[in-house]
Amino acid sequence: MAEAVFVVSAVIILVGAVGVVASRNPVHAALFLVQTLVGVAVLFVLNDAHFLAAVQVVVYAGAIVILFLFVIMLLGVDKAEELRIEPIFGQRPLAAVVGAALVAVLGTVVITGADVLTGLRRAGGDRALDGDATDIERMGRVLFSEFAFAVEITAALLTVAVVGAVILTRRTSRSDGSTSAETTVRET
Amino acid sequence: MDLAGLSTGWYLALAVALFAIGGLGLLVRRNPLVMFMCVELMLNAVNVAFVALGAGLNDVGGQVAVFFVLVVAATEVVIGLALVVAINRRRSGATADDVSLLKG
């Protein structure tokens, strides 16, 4: 059963990923991205990470893809892009070579290292996955004890991101008629 | 759940394929929005590997790492899209090649 679920969701994930890369229209790419993200959520459920599966659907497939679609519509770039033109000479053959090299390197790591990694050690205590606690309870315990400092840093990161987004896209009219967003781009 | 027939290696192989497709797309596509989507693909490949290895090691640390990756992905998208909007105000329809000089 688990094997069947894995194979089906793997096919869904890979088809979606190829669709993101190959589709000419950015809106179609965003929809293929949703397909991939939902497939990954199914794999999370298969690994008993139910909380992460829910977060994956809500945050990724919900918020992030909606944000993408919002910007696509806002900028009006929802028209098909000509993919046959190759702007930089030799970009695609080089990209194919780099991609093949990436698969070769990572594949070698997985083939030679998978047994070593999975045979390392089994966690115990709060971090063990086979206890009575639900996955959300376990994550909460570990996040607010062992990773409490990282959670605080994450809060700071989110604040910085919000302030940065506001500063980057704010329009304030100046005396010379330029906007602060334009000034920001010019200064970069 | 019984995952005896399904070893961590299969998840890692899927993660490798997904990461490579995302990386290839990042190198080939010129629309900055689609390039960001390819980055999301690569982040998701890493998430699959984290969760599978966490399950293999019986350790919740993999899921915690995915949690942080999610937060970083959200901030990355927010800042990236803000940059795309700011650049497109100056010159509409800009591709990644048009802003290679990083000046107006």
Image (cartoon, coloured by chain):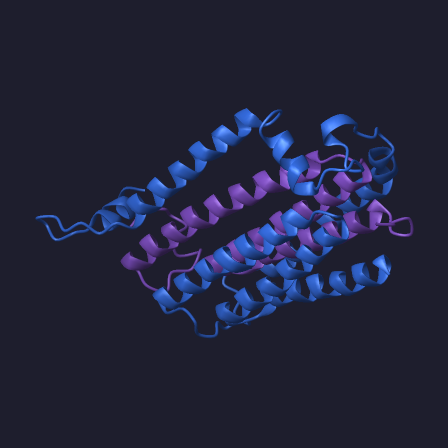
Q: Would you say A158 lies left or right of B64 here?
A: left
Residue located farthest toward the right when viewing the structure as drawn: B5
The answer to whether residue B8 shows anywhere in this view is yes
Residue located farthest toward the left when viewing the structure as drawn: A175
Q: Nearer the viewer, residue B8 or B60?
A: B60
The answer to whether residue A88 shows anywhere in this view is no
Rendered location of residue A181, percent (x, y)? 26, 49
Tell how many labels.
0
Hue used for the chain lettered A: blue
Taking the spot 59% from the left edge, 67% from the top edge, the residue there is A32
Rendered location of residue A142, percent (x, y)? 64, 30
Image quadrant in which the N terminus of chain A is located: bottom right
Rendered location of residue A50, percent (x, y)? 68, 50
Q: Is residue B103 above or below residue B98?
A: above
Which image quadrant for residue A13?
bottom right
Which image quadrant for residue A41?
bottom right
Taking the spot 56% from the left edge, 45% from the top edge, the residue there is B70
Taking the spot 88% from the left edge, 38% from the top edge, the residue there is A115
Q: Would you say B45 lies left or right of B4 here?
A: left
Hue used for the chain lettered B: purple
Rendered location of residue A95, percent (x, y)? 63, 55
Q: Nearer the viewer, residue A176 or A38?
A: A38
Q: Nearer the viewer, residue A58 or A156?
A: A58
Image quadrant in which the C terminus of chain A is located: top left
